[in-house]
Amino acid sequence: MNTLSESSVIAVEPVPASKPWFVYLVRAANGSLYCGISDDPVRRFAKHQSGKGARFFLSSPAMALVYTEICRDKSEALRQERLIKKLKKSAKECLVLTYQSD
């Protein structure tokens, strides 16, 4: 039987968890919804409001961050973004309503 002595145990540094990413929806002044991903959706929304970050907001300014969903990593956030972008506007509005009622 193999037993480990204290001297044979090697300290292992914990592997840092990957930084969470988010998929988010921003409402534009014309009522349309913009879907994107970020590791900091509040900071990204501020960029959108300042007129930087997405050409989408050149025609209608960003008004409100109306939905965020946390994801495990950037890859998962990209998958969720693709799924949300495929939804009809009515389904996206349901996401917004669900988020606001939480």
Image: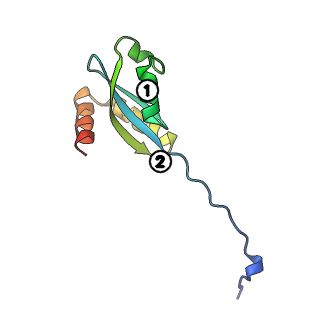
The image quadrant of residue 49 is: top left
The image quadrant of residue 1 is: bottom right
Locate residue 17 relative to residue 101 in the image: left or right.
right
Q: Nearer the viewer, residue 78 or 19?
A: 19
Crowding at dot 2, Cα within 10 Å, few <14 / some 14-19 / many 20+, comes out as few
Q: Are discs 1 and 2 less than 8 Å apart at CB?
A: no
Q: Residue at x 25, y 27 (%)?
A: 89
Q: Residue at x 73, y 80 (%)?
A: 6
Q: Residue at x 46, y 24 (%)?
A: 47
Q: Circle 1 sits on which residue?
A: 46
Q: Look at the numbered disc 1 and give the secondary structure of its residue.
A: helix
Which color scheme is applied?
A: rainbow
Furthest residue in direction top, as rendered:
59
- Please state which amino acid type lies under the numbered disc 1: Ala
Residue 38 at x, y percent in the picture: 47, 34
Residue 34 at x, y percent in the picture: 36, 25
Q: Circle 2 sits on which residue?
A: 72
Q: Is residue 23 above or below residue 50?
A: below
- Please state which amino acid type lies under the numbered disc 2: Arg
Locate residue 48 relative to residue 27 in the image: left or right.
right
Q: Look at the numbered disc 2 and give the secondary structure of its residue.
A: loop
Furthest residue in direction right, as rendered:
7
Residue 46 at x, y percent in the picture: 43, 26
